[in-house]
Image (spheres, grey):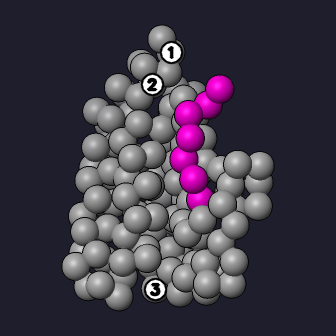
């Protein structure tokens, strides 16, 4: 029940905008064709941005994570240089603002996870928490 309440609050106070921006970014990447490998990662992040509580990010190399190999590492490096660092910075700034209040701490934690995910999205998987 608490996850549902947190997700609804998250969605109302900005999750819809974050998720929508990730969806639009993924669509723009898909249209360019060159950006197609990153579009699927952006759409995964969008689903997590809309409804993050009760879900977790599984990184490549962890149990249940996908191995990205050299190609995935290269994609993550290109992503970091051209998009990842400033998207992560925006999530970090929002997390600091949220963490000022006690009520905002769970939201700040999710924004920090989104910041980490924005740095290297290729190979990360989103799954429901057990």
In this orientation, does residue 58 appear?
yes
Q: Residues within 10 Å of mark 3 (few under 14, many from 20)?
A: few
Up/down of 110 relative to 84, above or below = above
Q: CB under 8 Å between callouts 2 and 1?
A: yes
Please provide percent x and percent y for residue 106: 56, 33
Mark earlier in primary sequence (3, 1): 1
Q: Could you say where residue 13 lies in the image, as x and y percent from the top left?
A: 32, 36
| Identity of the residue drawn at 55% across and 69% down | 122
Q: Is residue 19 magenta?
A: no
- Left or right for 87, reference 126: left
Q: Quadrant of residue 15?
A: top left
Per the model, the C-alpha gap separating discs 2 and 1 is 6 Å
Tell me if mark 1 has few (under 14), some (14-19) or many (20+) residues whose alpha carbon lies within 10 angstroms of its own. Answer: few
**Residue at point 36% right, 42% down?**
50
- Say left or right for 86 vs 9: right
Q: Is disc 1 placed on a helix, strand or loop?
A: helix
Element at badge 2?
helix
**Which residue is pictured at 50% across the width and 80% down the height?**
79
Placement of 37 over or under 78, stated as above or below: above
Residue designated by label 3: 82
- Of the numbered discs in the image, which one, if any, rests on residue 2? 1
Quadrant, the C terminus: top right
Is 10 located above or below residue 88 in the figure?
above
Dot 2 crowding, Cα within 10 Å, few <14, some 14–19, many 20+: some
Q: Are marks 3 and 1 in contact (CB under 8 Å)?
A: no
Task: Give the residues in magenta.
Answer: 124-130
Q: Residue 28 lies in what quarter of the image?
A: bottom left
Residue 7, x across and y down, in percent:
41, 28
Q: CA distance from mark 3 to mark 1?
A: 37 Å
């Amino acid at each position: 029940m608490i996850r549902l309440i947190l997700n609804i609050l998250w969605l109302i106070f900005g999750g819809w905008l974050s998720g929508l921006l990730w969806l639009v970014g993924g669509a723009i990447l898909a249209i360019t064709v060159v950006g197609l490998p990153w579009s699927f990662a952006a759409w995964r992040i969008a689903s997590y941005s809309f409804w993050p509580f009760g879900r977790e990010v599984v990184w490549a190399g962890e149990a249940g994570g996908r191995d990205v190999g050299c190609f995935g590492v290269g994609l993550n490096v290109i992503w970091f240089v051209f998009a990842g660092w400033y998207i992560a910075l925006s999530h970090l700034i929002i997390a600091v603002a949220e963490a000022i209040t006690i009520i905002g701490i769970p939201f700040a934690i999710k924004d920090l996870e989104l910041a980490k995910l924005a740095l290297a999205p290729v190979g990360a998987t989103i799954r429901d928490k057990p």
